[in-house]
Amino acid sequence: MSVLPNYHPIFFIGAVGCVISIIIHVFAAVLSMRFIRHRAKYPLLSHGPSMSLYVTTVVTLVFFLAHIIQIAVWALIFMGLGQFDRLEPAFYHSAVNYTTLGYGTMMEPPWHLLEPLEATAGILAFGISTAALSALLMRMMEQMQKEEEEADAKAATEAKN
């Protein structure tokens, strides 16, 4: 007879939750990249401050929605385990864990071990979102700088003639 409880089901459920979170976020990243590539195919529509604002807003909203879906998935897992009987407190608790806000445990042992797993999935997802948005903004800044340099070179050529 073992003194320690069997934690295998808990970690399996946690691993499934993490994998689902990763799949959702990778899907959001792929969707965002496809959107950006689609916008790049149409140069007349892809440049300028208003288009940059539009593209950045759409990509940000895609990642935001991915985060909300992931929080909801974890809330449903918690409800499925009988830790919550309504979606509202399950979603709130999930959001607290996912964002690493950390108000403390609300789940019964040993299921409370899922809380840090959700926090890990959340912090990784926020890292992916941050990296993707930073890369997008850097690319846009490089494009704007290139367009300014081309406009300056064209103006200098026209001034010589």
Image (cartoon, rainbow, N blue to C red):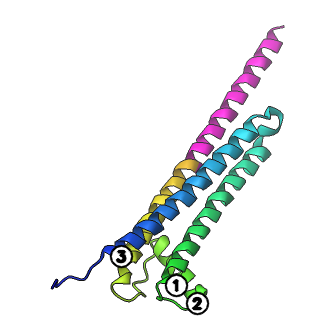
Q: In which quarter of the image is the N terminus?
A: bottom left
Foreground pick, 74 / 10: 10
Left or right, 42 with respect to 60, comes to right
Instruction: Check the image and report above or below for 89 versus 33.
Output: below
Q: Mark 1 and mark 3: span between their CA atoms?
A: 16 Å
Specify the quadrant of the image occupied by residue 159.
Answer: top right
Q: Does the magenta stretch include residue 142?
A: yes
Residue under the point 65% across and 49% down: 32
Residue placed most toward the observer, 37 or 96? 37
Residue at the spot of label 2: 86
Three-letter amino acid code of the residue under disc 2: Arg
Which residue is rendered at x = 73% and y = 18% of the image?
Answer: 153
Question: The residue tagged with tag 2: helix, strand or loop?
Answer: loop
Q: What stretch is highlighted in magenta?
A: 133-161
Disc 3, SS = helix
Task: Name the residue rendered at 52%, 84% in the picture.
Answer: 79
The residue tagged 3 is 9
Q: Please identify the residue farthest to the bottom as the structure is shown.
A: 85
Residue position marked by numbered label 1 in the rendering: 79
On whether residue 124 falls in the magenta region, the answer is no
Residue situated in front as seen by the camera: 28 or 13: 13
- Give the total of numbered labels: 3
Q: Which residue is drawn at 47% across and 62% down?
A: 19
